[in-house]
Amino acid sequence: MSTLSLFNSKDVAVAFALFFIACSVASSHIVHAPSPKVFKSRLKGQVVCYACISSANDSDPRQSYDGSSTTDLYRTLEKAGLLIPKSVTKCFESYLPNNPNYYQTDLVFCPNTVMEPGACVKLKGHHNGDQYIYRNCWSNMWIDKRPYARQMSERCYIDELVQNFVATSDNKICFCEDDLCNNSHSILLLLSNSFCLIIMFIIFLHLH
């Protein structure tokens, strides 16, 4: 074995050891979000999710429509590897009880099995000063399919590392496994600052 390859092997071993220690220390400070004992979607083998995209401009009649801004947003998301669902005005966040949310929004049925885990996803961020909202299911959102880690379920991620996932700002991405849980009213959970889970999320994003 060459000196260079031996040195690299030692570096890798040290890196893994440090990562393991960091995970052990971090795990003692994590407060895990409570989750159901059994998700119905796992029993059925599939989960139903809202699939749509909208921006603040779309839902505010006082704003003039800017097609170039929307096109630029879509290009930015596609560059991050995301498929663009149907644009629907009612996709945007609303917490009013009488507001007919998600009118004409697509519903997608995605696998959620032992062999192919899945989840509903809600991504929020800002692009050119305007907030946008993206809803989909994991298996339906990627141009190149990526495996899902169930440890990410019932969590939201807002850490700076996650901001590198897509070139928009103030990003927040949440995962859940109940049918239609990626709506406006779901309490999506604990904002995870877990070092290990954030690293896991980044690894899965760049796995392929």
Image (spheres, rainbow, N blue to C red):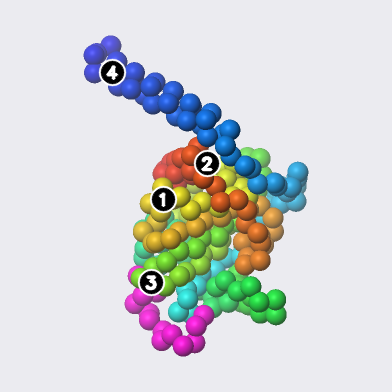
**Given contact means CB atoms under 8 Å apart, are the residues at marks 1 and 3 in contact?**
no
Rendering coords of residue 197 (x, y %): 52, 41
Q: On the rendered image, what quadrant is the N terminus found in?
A: top left
**Residue at coordinates 56% horizontally, 42% vertically from top-left?**
149
**Badge 4: how crowded within 10 Å, few (<14), some, or many (20+)?**
few
**Residue at coordinates 75% horizontally, 51% vertically from top-left?**
40
Give the CA distance from mark 2 to mark 4.
30 Å
Rendering coords of residue 109 (x, y %): 64, 59
**Given contact means CB atoms under 8 Å apart, are the residues at marks 1 and 4 in contact?**
no
Rendering coords of residue 101 (x, y %): 64, 75
Give the CA distance from mark 1 to mark 2.
12 Å
Rendering coords of residue 105 (x, y %): 60, 72
* Lateral position of residue 133 relative to residue 115, left or right: left
Q: Name the residue under label 2.
A: 194
Most extreme residue toward the left is 3
Q: Mark 4 points at which residue?
A: 7
